[in-house]
Image (spheres, rainbow, N blue to C red):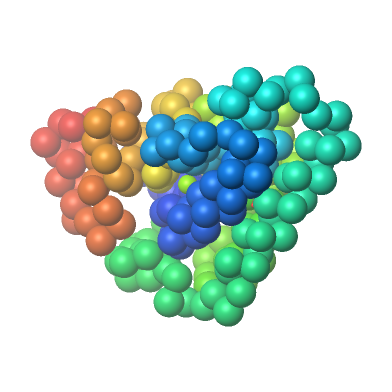
């Protein structure tokens, strides 16, 4: 019996994942690390410092920089990212999400946010969606990032719900793994080949409706 929904932010609620990608691509170029679609996919859902580590590792440069230098690069990426978000408003909300959130509220589902992003309070405010997500997991409190189940487990806890009562929604492979590890029902948004571990898959957010979710659960996709 589903009582709550735990949302990822970047790439699920807003189209910000393309800006994360752009900003990392820029930094990879500066570091002389070859960018690829695979790397872009692998970075989805991954925390800021872990993302930098992954980029350095991809280029065989993981031992080339001090912690201080790494922090400076991560800060630079974030400045670039925030520049790309300048002027962001509700038009950055992905298709169908506003209606879906309204419908969830109408049916008294509880909502929480399980985003790895430290910018999520700012982003939600710009989008005008902060009121829906009073309950959030603070990524600064986490021991392990996605794919560890910790963040989605907390997403259910902040709602006072059991994991089995929650559906988690993600666009990242590591995010789907985190939801599954937390024993929630997982919805993957995007390429089913990449998100094949999701209980339910939708190509894009416009398909994300209570009707479609109920149908998918009835036909036993789950
Ligand atoms: C995730 C994004 O939501 O947050 C990642 O999918 C990003 O791309 C991560 O690296 C951390 O975000 P931030 O805003 O704290 O650097
Ligand atoms: Mg995401």
Of residues 28 and 133, the one nearer the viewer is 28
Q: Quadrant of the N terminus?
A: top left
The residue depicted at 85 percent of the width and 29 percent of the height is 66
Of residues 145 and 67, the one nearer the viewer is 67
Q: Quadrant of the C terminus?
A: top left
Q: Position of residue 205 (x, y in %)?
A: 30, 57
Of residues 83 and 219, the one nearer the viewer is 83
The residue depicted at 22 percent of the width and 56 percent of the height is 207
Q: Position of residue 204 (x, y in %)?
A: 27, 53
Of residues 35 and 183, the one nearer the viewer is 35
Relative height, residue 57 to residue 113 (above, below): above
Q: Judge left or right: residue 147 versus residue 187.
A: right
The count of marks equals 0
Query: Is any part of residue 18 visible from this angle?
Result: yes
Q: Residue furthest left?
A: 219
Relative height, residue 80 to residue 199 (above, below): below
Q: Quadrant of residue 82?
A: bottom right
């Amino acid at each position: 019996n589903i009582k709550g929904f735990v949302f990822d932010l970047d790439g699920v609620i807003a189209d910000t994942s393309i800006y994360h990608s752009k900003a990392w691509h820029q930094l990879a170029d500066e570091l002389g690390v070859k960018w690829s679609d695979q790397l872009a996919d692998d970075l989805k859902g991954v925390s800021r410092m872990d993302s930098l580590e992954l980029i350095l590792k991809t280029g065989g440069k993981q031992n080339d920089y001090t912690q201080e230098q790494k922090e400076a690069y991560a800060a630079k990426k974030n400045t670039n990212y925030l520049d790309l978000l300048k002027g962001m408003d509700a038009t950055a909300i992905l298709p169908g999400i506003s209606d879906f959130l309204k419908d969830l509220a109408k049916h008294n589902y509880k909502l929480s946010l399980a985003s790895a992003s430290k910018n999520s309070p700012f982003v939600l405010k710009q989008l005008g969606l902060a009121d829906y997500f009073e309950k959030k997991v603070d990524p600064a409190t986490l021991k392990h990032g996605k794919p560890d189940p910790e963040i989605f487990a907390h997403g259910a806890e902040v709602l006072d719900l059991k994991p089995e009562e929650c559906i988690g929604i993600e666009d990242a492979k590591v995010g789907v793994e985190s939801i599954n590890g937390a024993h929630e029902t997982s919805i993957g948004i995007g390429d089913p080949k990449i998100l094949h571990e999701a209980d339910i898959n939708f190509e894009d957010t416009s398909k994300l409706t209570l009707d479609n979710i109920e149908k998918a659960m009835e036909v036993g996709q789950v």
